[in-house]
């Protein structure tokens, strides 16, 4: 089978198309003939060798949609250990879910990894309700554009952050009440102005200065859910400061959902249901051939993309 393989950590140029052996099925894994693979920001961190370093050579890629070889059923699957940028994948059976007819391959890919992240950050941890004033960082991105829609669906007032006018327009088109430049020099004042009051709930995927400014802008009793660190700056929080401000900081990692078969299956089915009904509109920001995974990474880390990026593993150039 063909795969986009890395033999070293580094920039987007480290990917090379290579013919490698298909993964072998194991007692807990099944074979999936992949149609589309997804690109996630976590793949950028892995490609750079940050936080965790898979053994080399490695095939990155954490989400796929395709046909289960055992029964031909259309399925989507998550691959926390990688293996997605390839024509065949071997996900754990418990991380593989059937895709309903009403949901396209692209939608399924868009709402699985990123939708689960948006849902659990917003609902399970953030406990969003219709009175909330919500800020979503990277509000036109893969997770963010779904979080904007889910927050709006929950009845909240929503402000999206994004770094370009076209991304801000995309976030508003998807349901944000307003959008603010993510590079605004006085981010706290800008989001307060856009919301009409201090935010009560922030979803943050950026970390560093963005996290600090938004945490400082929170209303008393507000909370911030940290689920990513695109700025690559790690952040520590002093509990004394939380007591003084009477605000909360929560953290989310998708692996905790994958650890629980029932939560994973039920929340994936809910997201597919919302996508199938058109409540959740997945935006496909780019479709790349397998030979252009590096370009997809360059576009993602260059902050020029919106929505979900997908890789067509049967196109090569
Ligand atoms: N906790 C989990 O288990 C989990 C699961 C999935 C994803 N995530 C995290 O969620 C975040 C979003 O993932 P995604 O795949 O949907 O990516 P994405 O949001 O489509 O792309 C990343 C966005 O981050 C923003 N950004 C802000 N500062 C940046 C910087 N210094 N460099 C690059 N981008 C920067 C950019 O938006 P603007 O240019 O518009 O500001 C960029 O478009 C990532 O941090 C990812 O690691 C976490």
Image: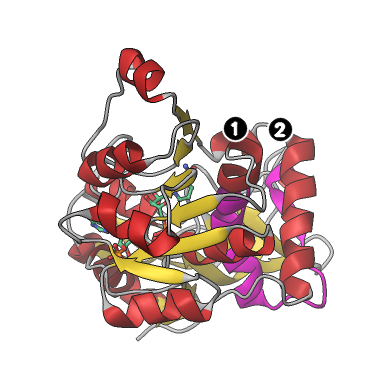
Of 99 and 191, nearer the camera is: 191
**Residue 46 placement (x, y as % from top left):** 32, 46
Question: Does 100 lie within the magenta span?
Answer: yes
The relative height of residue 246 versus residue 184 in the rendered view (above or below) is above
Instruction: Please identify the quarter of the rendering in which residue 136 is found.
Output: bottom left
Q: Secondary structure at mark 2?
A: loop
Q: Is residue 43 left or right of residue 315?
A: left
Q: Secondary structure at mark 1?
A: helix
Q: Is residue 127 left or right of residue 94?
A: left
Q: Is residue 129 left or right of residue 213?
A: right
Q: Give the labeled residue for mark 1.
A: 256
Of 126 and 121, nearer the camera is: 126
Main secondary-structure element of the magenta-colored stretch:
helix
Q: Residue at x 28, y 69 (%)?
A: 294
Q: Residue at x 29, y 80 (%)?
A: 165
Using the numbered discs, state the Cα–Cα distance from disc 1 to disc 2 in whole angstroms. Answer: 7 Å
**Residue 56 placement (x, y as % from top left):** 31, 43
The relative height of residue 251 versus residue 297 in the rendered view (above or below) is above
Instruction: Please identify the quarter of the rendering in which residue 187 is found.
Output: bottom left
Colour mapping: secondary structure
Q: Are marks 1 and 2 in contact (CB under 8 Å)?
A: yes
**Ligand 1 closer than 8 Å to the CB at disc 2?**
no
Is residue 207 visible to the viewer in this orientation of the structure? yes
Of 220 and 160, nearer the camera is: 220
Local packing at callout 1 (Cα closer than 10 Å; few below 14, some 14-19, many 20+) is few
Part of the protein shown in magenta: 94-119
Q: Give the labeled residue for mark 2.
A: 260
């Amino acid at each position: 089978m063909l795969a986009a393989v890395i033999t070293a950590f580094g920039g987007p140029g480290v990917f090379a198309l290579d013919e490698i052996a298909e993964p072998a099925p194991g007692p807990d894994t099944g074979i999936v003939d992949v149609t589309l693979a997804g690109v996630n920001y976590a793949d950028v961190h892995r490609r750079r060798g940050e936080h965790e370093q898979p053994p080399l050579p490695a095939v990155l890629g954490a989400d796929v949609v395709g046909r289960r070889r055992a029964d031909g059923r259309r399925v989507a699957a998550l691959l926390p250990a990688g293996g997605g940028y390839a024509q065949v994948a071997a996900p754990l059976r418990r991380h593989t879910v059937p895709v309903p007819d009403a949901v396209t391959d692209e939608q399924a890919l868009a709402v699985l990894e990123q939708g689960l992240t948006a849902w659990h950050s917003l609902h399970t941890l953030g406990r969003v309700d219709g009175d909330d004033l919500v800020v979503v960082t990277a509000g036109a991105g893969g997770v963010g554009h779904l979080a904007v829609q889910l927050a709006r669906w929950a009845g909240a007032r929503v402000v999206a952050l994004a770094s370009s006018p076209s991304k801000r327009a995309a976030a508003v088109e998807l349901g944000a009440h307003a959008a603010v430049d993510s590079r605004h020099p006085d981010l706290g004042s800008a989001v307060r102005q856009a919301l009409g009051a201090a935010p009560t709930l922030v979803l943050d995927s950026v970390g560093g200065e963005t996290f600090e400014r938004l945490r400082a802008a929170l209303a008393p009793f507000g909370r911030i859910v940290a689920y990513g660190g695109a700025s690559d700056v790690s952040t520590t929080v002093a509990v004394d400061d939380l007591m003084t401000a009477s605000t909360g900081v929560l953290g989310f990692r998708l692996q905790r959902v994958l650890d629980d078969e029932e939560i994973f299956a039920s929340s994936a089915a809910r997201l597919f249901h919302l996508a199938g009904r058109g409540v959740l509109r997945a935006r496909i920001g780019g479709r790349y051939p397998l030979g252009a995974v590096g370009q997809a990474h360059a576009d993602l880390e260059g902050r020029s993309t919106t929505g979900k990026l997908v890789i067509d593993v049967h196109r090569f150039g």
